[in-house]
Image (cartoon, rainbow, N blue to C red):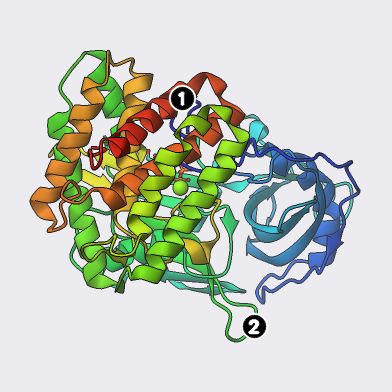
Amino acid sequence: MSDAAPPHREATTTRPGPHPGSSTPSAEGARASGDAGRPDARGLLDSLGPLLLDWLPRQRWFAGKGRPITGFALVSATELLPPSGGAPGLLHLLVHARQEGMSEDCYQLLLGVRDVLPPHLAPALVGRPADGPLRGRAVYEGLTDPRLATLLLERLRVPGRLGPLRFTREPDVVISPDLAPRLLDAEQSNSSAVYGETYILKLFRRVGPGVNPDLELPRALANAGCARVPAPAAWFEAEPRHAGAEPMTLGVLQPFLPGSADGWQLALGALAVRADFTASARALGHATAEVHLALAEALPTTVLDRHLLETLAAAMTRRLEAAAEAVPALRPYRAALRAAYDDIAAPGGAGRTWRAQRIHGDLHLGQALRTPADGRWSLIDFEGEPAIPLAERRRLQPAARDIAGMLRSFDYAAAVGRAPGTGWADAARAAFCEGYAAVHPDDPREDPRLLRAHETDKAVYEVLYEARHRPDWLAVPMSAIRRLADGHRAAGGTPV
Ligand SMILES: Nc1ncnc2c1ncn2[C@@H]1O[C@H](COP(=O)(O)OP(=O)(O)OP(=O)(O)O)[C@@H](O)[C@H]1O
Ligand SMILES: [Mg+2]
């Protein structure tokens, strides 16, 4: 994600906080769970720990930046390929990183091991352990090595187990063995490798127990016949460490959409030449509605009863109060914004039945890809906001939350693309809702209270984010705050 992109998730790279003095990391709880080629787990982490201490915080997918790592614990170590002769080895590690003041995060590492590192892999070097089983060898980021990335695809092609790792392929999918890999150089919170422009493997970096929604939802959508999402072809997981625990999703292989561009790029491209974007926005609304309908069909839904609405409004109000404490510019709008939340919680406030369902959870222009050949939109990246705990991300929520995310994204695109006035964003938002309503029985414009509350919640989050990290950008969400507050004062003015 570039600096100019909207803050669609908590800025894990810049999370502020105290910076306690660094302490010596220690390897604890080392446990090799591999049966085949099981490495000497404790010795391994003792020797890798000092290298990881330096390397891990420099990875863009490392979530706990700004706080020193105080210790590592090995969850599992699996040798996917033992090094032999001049050929590289591939080591799969799940490692808990302990940091002061933070819950422990589990990271997935794929480490290449070679005696001699070729120059083109030099930038991928993690280091050379001074002792332990890998003493003196070059340990490096394995996905950057085409031989090792190919090996991973081979594992996915031929389902099976290796130690705690379980590789699964959809039975009707045939994956060719001759797909050349390339590591995607995107600013992302995971790592992705593209194979022969045919498949893309997303390797989750911060992992935890429970199926990742980025596997769960696309699979459910594919099974429901929804073609708006690349259908998982294969995936791999770590098996639970004890009975009753859930497996951890580690990676998902999906069809690659060649030549596709994401909605953020396309919107900026349109803005640069003052081209119309309403047709694209309408089609995107259409696609989003199809995905929401299919998710509601395939997975559980619930009616948002009074209690749930009160809980939702209370959480939004808490976030508003906290943001207003931190950002004085918000305070004049506090009452009007709070009223938008009261609207959904007040007795009789619902006035109609709102439903909650599984949703995308982090929808914005960057999560939509359009393929050039047919101009069709697909949605990607269903993992939700990585900063939010998995159980929360898998909760049923109003579809309005996704719609609000996309509407806010149009505002950010207009600001980055220097649209004159509000016309471009207003037209894009209206077209998106129109496209949505053409497919979905719930027209977001009909009763805008739930959507307004979600759009307000998102804009409040953005205000806090921008005030903390990019004060120059504060004007973008603040103009939405003014619009949303005025919309409420005008008694029912729609935010779209
Ligand atoms: N099926 C696909 N076809 C083509 N490109 C894709 C596909 N899936 C993902 N991409 C590309 O890879 C990028 C990263 O994918 P994705 O958003 O799933 O990763 P992520 O690590 O969750 O990113 P983020 O940190 O932004 O949430 C996308 O922005 C897109 O450019
Ligand atoms: Mg993501």
Q: Residues within 10 Å of mark 2 (few under 14, many from 20)?
A: few
User: From the viewer's perspective, is residue 202 above or below residue 367?
Assistant: below
Q: Position of residue 212 (x, y in %)?
A: 46, 63
User: Extreme left residue here?
Assistant: 438
Give me the C-alpha separation between circle 2 and circle 1: 44 Å
Q: Residues within 10 Å of mark 1 (few under 14, many from 20)?
A: few
Question: Can residue 193 be seen at all in this image of the molecule?
Answer: yes
- Mark 1 residue type: Ala
Q: Position of residue 267 (x, y in %)?
A: 27, 27
The residue drawn where x is 56% and y is 51% is 387
Q: Position of residue 494 (x, y in %)?
A: 23, 39
Residue identified by numbered label 1: 4
User: From the viewer's perspective, is residue 137 above or below residue 245?
Assistant: above
Q: Nearer the viewer, mark 2 or mark 1?
A: 1
- Comparing 306 with 138, the one in front is 306
User: From the viewer's perspective, is residue 1 above or below residue 301?
Assistant: above
Question: Can residue 154 be seen at all in this image of the molecule?
Answer: no
> In the shown orientation, is residue 37 left or right of residue 373?
right
> In the shown orientation, is residue 118 left or right of residue 10?
right
Where, by quadrant of the figure, is residue 263 drawn? top left
Which quarter of the image is occupied by the C terminus?
top left
Q: Position of residue 89 (x, y in %)?
A: 65, 54
Residue identified by numbered label 2: 242
Return the mark for residue 435. none
Cβ of disc 2 within 8 Å of ligand 2?
no
The residue drawn where x is 41% and y is 58% is 214
Asked which secondary structure carries label 1, the reply is loop
- Comparing 451 with 10, the one in front is 451
- Mark 2 residue type: His
